[in-house]
Amino acid sequence: MKIPVVDFELLKIGLDDVADEKLNVLSQELKAAFTEVGFVYLKNTGIAQQEVDAVMDISKRFFLLPDEAKTPFSRGSDANNQNHGWVSSETERLNPSRAGDLKEAFNTTSLHPDAKWPSNEVLPGFREMQESFFLRCKDLSLRVLRVMSLSLGLDPEVFQSKHALVGSEENGTTLRTLYYPPVRMETVKEGQLRCGEHSDYGTITLVFQSAEGGLQVLSRSGDFISAPSIPGTVLINVADLMQRWTADVFISVIHRVLLPPPGDMSIRQSLAFFLQPDDDAVITCCDGSDKYPPVKSGDYLLERFKASYGRK
Ligand SMILES: O=C(O)CCC(=O)C(=O)O
Ligand SMILES: [Fe+2]
């Protein structure tokens, strides 16, 4: 099994007024990927590799600050948005049966002017770059939702319309810049990974990786396959709420990030944009099957956070 590469040129960011009929081939390609593999690489999306590199560069400067400089921006310290902010290494376990993940993250969940950010004196441009990349990812992901609904023969707005509040306090969509520090094997706990086995919680996730690789995806046959970085592309996966929404037509599959080989002291970076429906949106199976009971997006997300932050 391989993760397909699909050309998104027809609906790339900036191209508007594209008739639904023109999207037939593209939608069938996406449908095949999301029903059989759960992951797809999109090329020609309008998001250039240089943009991705620039966001990673400024993110790295943030992560290399001493912990004391990052602590004031910790996740949980922003009064208006509990998910916004810095997550220190080993705080999160995406597979709760393993030791804490060997990664740090900064979550951009709120675009509110009062959200907490490192000042421009400490890290010029950090906030602006995260916020503008968030909006680029939002634009692309809403385009992908349109094609996904068309591919199922549904109203083209059926998924999009439940994502009207992305970037506000009423929607949990998050751009996460991730930093995986060098791994000293002698300090690694038993079973510890850079990111434990999990599936994502929301609608779809956009992933941009640095060149080192390490991401693996569970295939239908039960083996993990590599999902390497392919420069210039965006890796997109179906997440759990979208699987529920489509009554298991689109599949949300388990993935993880392994440790580097022993002795390899390289870092790894990624940017993950987790698209989530509006908190108040009720997700009901789109085929009318009621295979899963209706669930409110915001309630569902909180339940999932509880599991990955465990005892906290
Ligand atoms: O770092 C990556 O490549 C992906 C991480 C991931 O799957 C996640 O944070 O949900
Ligand atoms: Fe993930």
Image: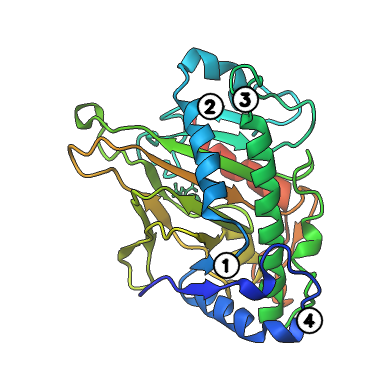
Q: Amino acid at mark 4?
A: Ala
Q: Amino acid at mark 3?
A: Pro
Mark 2 to mark 4: distance in Å?
Answer: 49 Å
Mark 3 to mark 1: distance in Å?
Answer: 30 Å
Mark 3 closeness class: few <14, some 14–19, many ≥20 residues within 10 Å = few
Mark 4 closeness class: few <14, some 14–19, many ≥20 residues within 10 Å = few
Q: Which mark is residue 294?
A: none
Mark 3 to mark 4: distance in Å?
Answer: 41 Å
Foreground label between 2 and 1: 1
Q: Amino acid at mark 2?
A: Lys
Is disc 3 in contact with disc 1, using a CB cutoff of under 8 Å?
A: no
Mark 2 closeness class: few <14, some 14–19, many ≥20 residues within 10 Å = few
Foreground label between 3 and 4: 3
Determine the secondary structure under disc 1.
loop
Q: Which residue is mark 2?
A: 312
Q: Which residue is mark 4?
A: 19
Mark found first going from the N terminus, 3 or 4:
4
